[in-house]
Amino acid sequence: MPASVAREVTLATAWLRLGLSERLLDDCLGYLHGRATGGEPLIGQQLVRGELAEIRMDHLEVAAVLDAAPPSDAQLLDVHRQITGADRALLRLLGASGFVADGRAGSRTSPSCSPTRTPEGTAMYELDGRLTALRTRAAEWAGDLAAVGADLDHDPDAVHRVLDTPVMRYLATARYAPSADTPSLTSGGHRFSLDSVLEQVVFFEELAVVDVGAVLAAPGAPMAGPLVDLLGDEEQREWFFAQLRSAPTWVFFALTEPAHGSDAAGLTTRLDPDGDGFRLTGTKRYVGNAPRARLGVVFARVRPGPLGLRAVLVTAPAPGLTIEALPTIGLRGAALGAITMSSVAIADDRVLGRHLPATRRGVLSWVHVFNRIRPRVAAMGIGIARAACEYVRVHRRTLRPAARDRLDALCRRVEAVRQLNLAAARAVDADPADGRLASAAKARAARLAEDVTVACLEYFGPGARLDHPLLGKLVRDARGVEFMEGASNVQKLIVSQDLIRRGRPT
């Protein structure tokens, strides 16, 4: 059989196996809904949900790789191994029913459902000329971050040295949401405003290859800005973004609480009525750029239930507002802080969404913002992993065949997650309410960054972190990606919740 024909057969077989594996997942969901432990459906157990999420993310990643143009022979082998791993995980969830010949697993002899994507999607996620031009511009600008990246680990204020560079000036005023007055950049004859998630992931991945800490240290409102665009009225938006345009301004985004993490349902910070305004009382933790900021968004509760949540604009310093820097092991440029609010006065016109119905200013509206942010965070994790692989290639030019194969496998894994993230970006651009792929990409990218950076240390033996401080920094920075915009257990809950609904008996 000619090599080209054999390759097409391998590709077609991969799509066939993916369809079979997805059907097996559907059967597994039905089986788990019918099993109970302690009077509760087995599918509701957290460990089971986590395993289902991992399997689903395997399917999504495989589909993204197969959709890309065209997967290499090595990538196809990786795909087949990944599908086999997903099938084995499903068999474990099926227990003995996956072992008997007429059980659920034994009946899968032909695909009876469509795969996650179709072969006609080939080349869908290749970067076209326009996005390649954006990537080139980001790589050029990223060079300005290299000089300050390592210094930020010792002195977070070192960011002031590069505030006048093109990349910092752009990050300081970018909107990250569709808007008529979004600042633009040009490259290769194309104009970009970074108001699409796809453009954001291409741009931020390239910056992250140089230094994620420097990116996070930039002034601007990468998280708060999209929320103000979504919930703010015309006056609030003009007031907010005018401050970003007037001078380099850091803006914090305060959701996470010490006892509840980023669980909006458990949020306890209060927004109490006080005459014509409100009083804000509570604590927030792990808030990026809080010690630098003079403006921020705080999430609080006016009454119980999901419709009782609000987002308010806060200026700093302010009476009753205390901000404390938190020491971290990595990403020190992000300047994480803890915020304590004791009866902080909030004017009525600083409550976002006051002109909107309750259903449009609560949790559901925030979800759209979080869905847009997660692929951008995933891009940063992918950039860190890419940087680690490139470091090994530069500093270990001579490798034994086995070591070279391991490095090639790491690089292919980076590319696979990258394709998943590009697919997630396109999905959110098409429907901001659909964050399933975004959550999958964020969880996979966080794990990727940690796994790849640690694996790259092994190429330099004992003492690698001391002898290669940049690689050691990448390992520490990679750990921080896990906690940005929701830890992996949160993302898995989102992915598994969709599966549970899909598998619920009708």
Image (tube, helix red, strand yellow):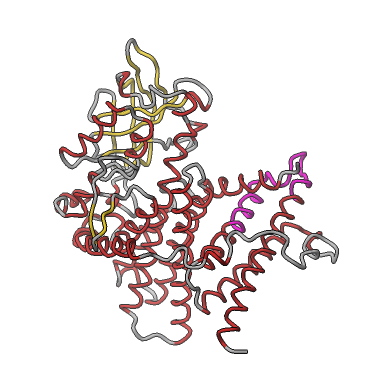
Query: Can you name the residue that lies furthest to the bottom here?
Result: 1
- What residue range appears in magenta? 32-56
Direction from residue 169 to residue 467 in the image, left or right = right
Magenta includes 45?
yes
Tell me the quarter of the picture where residue 77 sits: bottom right
On-image quarter of the N terminus? bottom right
Tell me the quarter of the picture where residue 467 sits: bottom left
Can you say whether 75 is above or below 443 in the image? below
Q: Nearer the viewer, residue 94 or 362?
A: 362
On-image quarter of the C terminus? top right
Q: Residue at x 26, y 54 (%)?
A: 191
Can you say whether 499 is above or below 240 in the image? below
Magenta includes 39?
yes
Tell me the quarter of the picture where residue 81 sits: bottom right
Direction from residue 84 to residue 466 in the image, left or right = left
Can you say whether 361 is above or below 461 in the image? above
- Location of residue 462 in the rendering, given as x and y in whole percent from the top left corner: 39, 74
Q: Residue at x 64, y 50 (%)?
A: 47
Magenta segment, principal secondary structure? helix
Direction from residue 261 to residue 144 in the image, left or right = left
- Location of residue 277 in the rendering, given as x and y in whole percent from the top left corner: 33, 15
Task: Count the numbered circles shown.
Answer: 0
- Location of residue 359 in the rendering, given as x and y in whole percent from the top left corner: 49, 27
Direction from residue 78 to residue 99 in the image, left or right = right
Q: Nearer the viewer, residue 138 or 316?
A: 138
Q: Residue at x 66, y 51 (%)?
A: 48
- Location of residue 464 in the rendering, given as x and y in whole percent from the top left corner: 35, 72
